[in-house]
Image (cartoon, rainbow, N blue to C red):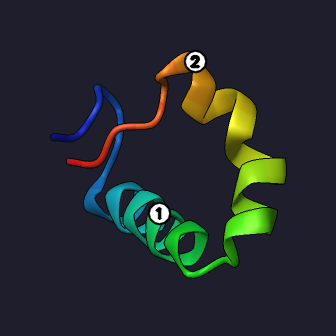
Amino acid sequence: MLAPGETSDDLELHVGAVVRVRELPDDVLVREAGPLIAGGTISLP
């Protein structure tokens, strides 16, 4: 699950960012992450 060179601390930062993004209102999420979602680059573990 960790990329080469990552530590468990790095993983926790990634997971925390995902949680914060999922708590945003939909309009903010679409405006900020729309291009990423449209590109299919967001995936949950």
User: What residue did someone put label 1 on?
Assistant: 18
Q: Quadrant of the N terminus?
A: top left
Q: Is residue 38 above or below residue 24?
A: above
The image shows residue 29 at horizontal and vertical percentages of 70, 60
- Measured Cα–Cα span from mark 1 to mark 2: 17 Å
Q: Secondary structure at mark 2?
A: helix
Determine the residue located farthest toward the left in the rendered image: 1
User: What residue did someone put label 2 on?
Assistant: 39
Q: Residue at position x 34%, y 57% from top?
A: 11
Could you say which is closer to the camera, residue 19 or residue 4?
A: 19
Q: Is residue 16 left or right of residue 34?
A: left
Comes first in the chain, label 1 or label 2: 1
Q: Is residue 44 left or right of residue 41?
A: left
Q: Residue at position x 35%, y 41% from top?
A: 6
Q: Secondary structure at mark 1?
A: helix
Q: Residue at position x 54%, y 66% from top?
A: 17
Amino acid type at mark 2 = Gly
Amino acid type at mark 1 = Val
